[in-house]
Image (cartoon, helix red, strand yellow):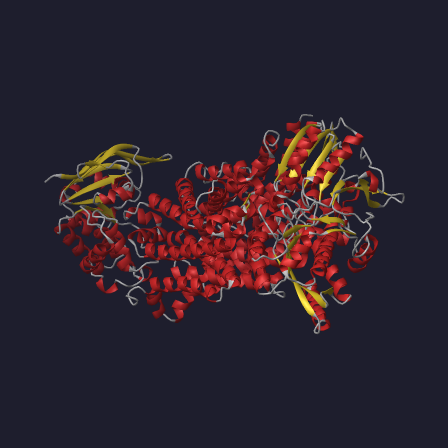
Amino acid sequence: MSGILASMIDGLLIGSVYGLAAMGLSLIWGVMDVINLTHGSMIALGMFGMYLLFSATASNAYFLLAPLIVVGLVLGIIVYWLAVNWVVDRPILMSLLSTFAVNMVVIGLGTAIWSTSPYNVNFSVPGITVGEYTFTGNHIAAASSAVVIALLLELFLRRTRAGKAIRAVADNRAAAELMGISSTRVLMVAFAIGIALAMASGALVSTLFPFTILSGAGYQLKSFVVTVLAGLGKPFGALIAGVLLGLLEGAVSPFIAVSWIPLIEFGLFVVVLIAFPRGIFGKATA
Amino acid sequence: MTALLEVQGVSKRFGGLQAVGDVSFTLQEGEILGLIGPNGAGKTTLFNLVNGVYKTDTGSIIFSGKNITGRSPDQVVHLGLARTHQIVRPLNGMSVLENVIVGACYGREYQSLRAARATALEVLEQVGMASRANSPAHSLTLAFKKRLEVARALAARPKLLLLDEVLAGLNPTEIAQMIDLIRKIRDSGVSVFMIEHVMQAIMNLSDRILVLNLGHKIAEAPPAEVVKNPDVVEAYLGFPDIVDKLRGAS
Amino acid sequence: MKRVIFIAFLLSLSFAATSSAQTITVGFTVSRTGALNVDSLEQYRGFELWRDTVNAAGGIKAGGKSYMVQFASYDDESNSKRVQQLYTRMILEDKADFLFSPYSSSLTATAAIVTEQYEKIMLTTGAAEEKTYKLGNQYLFQMFAPATQYLTAALDALKARDPKATVAFVYEDASFSVAVVTPAKAYAQQLGFNVVFAEAYAPNTTDFSAIIDKVIASKATVLLGGGHYADGSTLARQLYGHKVPLKMVALLVAPDSPQWSELGDAAVGVIVPSQWEPQSTFKAQYGPSGADFGKAYSAKYNAPPSYESAGGYASGLILQHAIEQAGGTDTAKVAAALNSTDLTTFYGRSKFSTVASEHGLQVGHTIFLAQWQNDKSGALVKQVVWPLAGKSADLKYPIR
Amino acid sequence: MILRRPLLWLILALAALFVWLPLRNHDVALREDLILVAVAIILTSNLNLMIGYTGYVNFGHIVFYGLGGYVGLYLATVLNWNLIVAALIAGVTVSVLALLFGLGILRLRGAYFALATIGVLVAVQAFVANFEPWGRSTGMYVSFASYAPLGGARRALWITYYLIIGVMALSLVLSLGIRRSKFGLGLFAIREDEDAAIVLGVNATVYKAIIYSVSAFLPAVAGALMFFKNGMIDPSIAFEYMLSLEGIVMLMLGGQGTVAGSALGGALYERLRSYLLTSPRLSEFHLVIAGALLLLVVRLAPGGLIGWLYRLVPRSREVVE
């Protein structure tokens, strides 16, 4: 197997986890026009949530996603009432600051509890070896879990009443309210799902890499890139954009030092923002 | 009389919609030119093309002897073409006076802050808002917000003023005051190009009227001729009461 | 939080005990938070154990007086931004008489600017990079063997076992590891090794798969590099997870920590260049023996000491020795005593360069290689494998 | 004169106080505290030019500080230029770069602009981390010899302190000057309604690019001075995302859009952080406290401390503005 192919498969696997992380950000942003700066800390909480649950139960880490998603939904509702409900429709700075404040509190509490030392979830799934390259079982399991969660979300949004309400509010809140949809409740549910997705992606990352309470920040930045590439409010687009970003990383890394990748990624991010403010998959018209 | 504004074959398309198609007209110095047409006729789009908010697809716009096609709104203001917005856009966080000072500072004369302040006070006096100079702009009633729009545009010391439905939403007393104001403005030497739905007013004020329908010009004539124009009557057929008003006004 | 209260408690105890004796204050910052926190805390424990041992014995006795030791220390958040503010504060407000360095070469470089200005002695530990000692400092004394030595030892050991090995360098792009790898690369070529791949990764890297794919493609059989604990342990885990066919892996700093054994199978066979190992059998001319230090440390912290802990403790010993030689705490006299120090403690030999162009550089201490091996009972232990004279086990090569 | 321009005199008095306080007892510890306060004020007041005056949320403002530090340190220690010249050239270089970046990303509005500024920050950091002449991730160290032209390290630190105080005073005077200028009025118009401002004749594209570039200048100069004083620079401390965000917190705390608010917020927040960091009981909770404080300010007093003061004592507005 050639190095570049192996590298791209690795990229594809990790890319789906980026995509899952970005879905939460994208959903919230698209539905309520709030850039959720608690995203990074929620990803970190997902990591520590997995760590605690795994240490307590020692069961298959990927089965623990379900209870963590529930925790995420509850946490999302709390954060929504604490910091988000009153900034919807306020200037963008307000929502940025209020979510950032929650982020600081969470990081601060996390630092007090866990310090900033790295933690690991010592769970491993046997990998697949092709020639001299081995793809770890954890990567494969995490990527599959991400895709399954993404599909479930897409089904929820397209097939259920609540999902349709979320899409209606995202599309045109005023019109949705006229049709009798309680937008506050819809926003709360969408926010809670966004947080649950962030936590789920954090939980998946925790099975791949060591993490500290500060680790969420890097994934938050990646989520921004992915969300912008995909266009706002397109959660499934975010998954695809995440995979593409992973593939891109995998495709270029054999040819340049890995430390250049952030420059390429964020350079691309700025260029795409300027050239296609609605995202590559967004509508072409302004 | 010489032509102040010459619009030649201007078009604008949004996706599949021809918002303005091949419109040409001339506005003479010192004239009040009215612009009417049913909803969606492309009136505000035409304004946006004239003052550069939108780029034209085809055609040219000559203002005061200069080709201003493709120039941005801020450049157009410096040449002496100011406008108001159909939906008022006060600078909410600032006082009434500051709003008008912005107009004066960045208008045709590009006045200094000190001169602009004097101009602004003068203009506020002219539009009858001197007593509200220090009120926050967001606290005004709609009628005063409309006057503020006019005041800001006037403060730019324009040669031509584009007024976009400054009468809409006002009560009869307020309408009378505004009509009076517009006359005074014209008398002070500023030409006026105005969109209006209040027919009685526009018929009375305008020297000539331009009628748009579905983005195309269907008439350009003095008020009395416009109401007799069969194309105009047909365009308004869906709105019989307006036809009545047109007739009544003449 | 508990730890803070505990320290406050200890401090108040030492106050109570010393009301009759004089005190000296030693200041330093600790990275209680941030990327360096594992390594920095181990170093701190060394300081702490030294202080408690000294105070329990009635303080440092010099010039007919006893000096009880107290600390002034703050969290630097693993970030040099506040280091100068905090060192200035310790010097001026907490009236620190002597200073220890923060952990890591870059934080130390920042602190040194302040300590030099105030002509305060700073013993640096956890700061192996040499550049700082070549800037004309007068009061800086390095406890660690300098960075150049770290991987040259590993290359010597490799040369003895497999002169045809192909070498890859994968290392953190940070002051310390760059200072280690740059001379090591040259040395590897000098020894005739084929260096097939070399890449620095950003500090905080957690995903090494791209680099690992490149290492596999390069057909390297030996990997040298690493940086600090967080990245080094991650790299080792992922090398293991991707089943990279390597015969030897030597990483900086990280494998020395007792926490390394938590890596399980991924830990096996990894070599670490070390400043000190519990198995080392130096004849201490001064202070405790290695065994006594290890026992006291394990009793207090419930974990074996790492070389950072030993370095921390040894800094205290060397300072204590110099104060005793100087007969007091006068900076000039203590500095003179440090300049003429040539002392072997449990930590090994310590001697500082007095050449003007590299004043304070450590010239007495040398590097060990330690390797994680399974002992007869299958437990993971760290064995000294180099230099051959001091080995406690043979180098396991290839790893598997 | 004082009655006509109270704030200008207040700024000069503040600068004089900053100069006098540590000098009185030659109190270097106080100087070290104050220099961080001064830097906080410099960053906040220049950030205010973008956020408070123009309404553009810049999340990557720290990029100017870091780049200034790099250019300045490179000129002062590698090429051995005079410190003041190096700092000024750093300021000009970064301003020119900001102008170029600005013309690109200022086409974006609202959240998109905010995100693009994060992108610029991370991209620049990644570039510098790979840039060989600037020492890649390892950064650059100041040789002690570099302090010799200023009369040794000890004097050099005092000199950089006074220069920083000068930059602080300049930042505040600049903010005040812009606030009272026609240029400032144009910026406020953009902040309130950019499209309306354009129709009123404000050349928003040029104005935004200019203010973006201007808001880069003094932070870059300060960066050059501070990293020279710091003795080393590396990408992680030069482009600290967290510090950039804290700048916004400080601004909100004091009150965006006002000169006094930006200074007050910068000073208070920095003192609070320093206090929490060195207080043994609270040091582990400094982020929690700062975060909770921010949430309260945003929620209860969105105008910040200054806005709150104006509401309590309306007369104070006339004095302070």
Is residue A64 visible in the rendered structure shown here? yes
How many discs appear? 0
Q: Position of residue B223 (x, y in %)?
A: 15, 44
Foreground residue among A16 and C317: C317
Foreground residue among D30 and C362: C362
Relative side of C136 to B80, left or right: right
Is residue D255 visible in the rendered structure shown here? no
Vertical placement of residue C149 versus B95, above or below: above
> In which quadrant is the N terminus of chain D drawn?
bottom left
Vertical placement of residue D118 versus C289, above or below: above
**Residue found at the very far right of the displayed protein:** C376
Q: Position of residue B13 (x, y in %)?
A: 33, 35
Among the 4 quarters of the image, the one containing residue B115:
bottom left
Foreground residue among C245 and B89: C245
Q: Position of residue C18 (x, y in %)?
A: 71, 71
> In which quadrant is the C terminus of chain D drawn?
bottom left
Vertical placement of residue B209 versus C93, above or below: above
The residue at 26%/34% (across/down) is B10
Relative side of C342 to C379, left or right: left
The residue at 27%/53% (across/down) is B102
Q: Position of residue C66 (x, y in %)?
A: 72, 67
**Residue found at the very far left of the displayed protein:** B1
Foreground residue among D305 and A52: D305
